[in-house]
Image: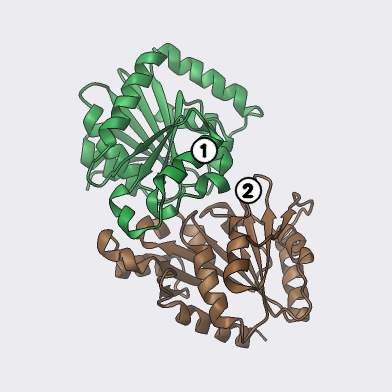
Chain colours: A brown, B green
Amino acid sequence: MDEVRIIEIKKSVFESNDKDADNLRKELKDKGIFLLNLMSSPGSGKTTTLIKTINLLKDKLRIAVMEADIDSDVDAVKIKEATGIQSIQLHTGGMCHLDAEMTRQGLDALELEGVDFAILENVGNLVCPAEFDTGSSKNAMILSVPEGEDKPLKYPLMFSICDVVLINKMDVMPYFDFNLEKCTEYIHMRNPKAEVIPICAKTGEGVDKFAEWLLKEIKNWK
Amino acid sequence: MDEVRIIEIKKSVFESNDKDADNLRKELKDKGIFLLNLMSSPGSGKTTTLIKTINLLKDKLRIAVMEADIDSDVDAVKIKEATGIQSIQLHTGGMCHLDAEMTRQGLDALELEGVDFAILENVGNLVCPAEFDTGSSKNAMILSVPEGEDKPLKYPLMFSICDVVLINKMDVMPYFDFNLEKCTEYIHMRNPKAEVIPICAKTGEGVDKFAEWLLKEIKNWK
């Protein structure tokens, strides 16, 4: 099994996360690094989605990944083994989210020379990560079919701050009561501009649409 | 559709939550009210599990339910419609967990005369609710099959504080890579004493085992 670097993230000392996030966003822009912040509940399929997405994009972009978790390094190892790209694990020391300064600690631990697309896989949590701007260029989230279509009603902030919502595990739709049309309606109640893309990370179906969305966003951002 | 009361929970002013939680636990003991704190990720099936459990126990115990969510009242309405028991909705105002004082605000809003079993359905979150003692007599959590068997590795604190872990959505096991034996091993790494009960809340399978566990715990607690 590949070894990956594990970074123990320290609590931020900055008072104003919003200001710090804006600074980080500007610094990254100057360096030509597009940062994606990927969020979801635990077990929605963030890592599997990333593996499929990275394998579609790694010939077009130079990518580096930060996997944030409270404990374990299983995700960073998975990404490295399945894609061959640079991947590090961030340990949050029990903290439920990453803010801009914590994201910066992760970026500082990466080899960023030549990297034009950095990905932060945030802690699995639909609540707290939505409250802290990481300095990302765009926010993405995954809602998986088994979680149910009512999640935008219960976790309004998360859905309102995401530029794209991937509906994952579409292959198991027949076994769950999940109404995609109603779910999309709820998402657009929270955020009319959010792009909604149904995918199946396991088979890779629909992930090409997400990759296209990313390429378009990166092009517009430049 | 039934109407339910919605309680807007205020942020706690108490400095020491642990002390306050112990006080609440003692007060509830004196009143003969067993409080269960039920936690899980969003969409793991807390409400469906509660409905099936309450319908098995409502002739033996007088039950009242507090449904905590950041927004919406869908869960409290569902419980009331499906079981007929007393059910209120707690709105946390964006907060990701409930502590003892917030739980007390919920209990104060219930009609507790004659109630011997109160249930708190915590905010869907595997991180923060584990850090705040609610004053509950016992902690329960649900991990659902689609979330994956590795969750005890990534969210150690949650698994370490729970007296019982329900493995839900057992009916969809054939469609997911989920090793129940390995999952149980990971749970016991975090908490050797945790009871692990596989269930399917949708069909009700295994929920009788959880109901039996609750009756046994309430008897021992008295």
Image quarter in which the C terminus of chain B is found:
top left
Q: Nearer the viewer, residue B173 or A222?
A: B173
Report x, y in % for residue A58. 61, 81
Can you see residue A207?
yes
Mark carried by residue A71: 2
Q: Establish if A23 lies above or below B220.
A: below
**Mark 1 highlights which residue?**
B159
Chain for numbered disc 2: A
Would residue B182 appear left or right of A38 to someone viewing this image?
left
- Name which residue type carries label 2: Asp
- Name which residue type carries label 1: Phe
Q: Residues within 10 Å of mark 1 (few under 14, many from 20)?
A: many
Q: Residue at x 52, y 63 (%)?
A: A46
Residue B36, quarter of the rendered image: top left
Q: CA distance from mark 1 to mark 2?
A: 13 Å
Q: Residues within 10 Å of mark 2 (few under 14, many from 20)?
A: many
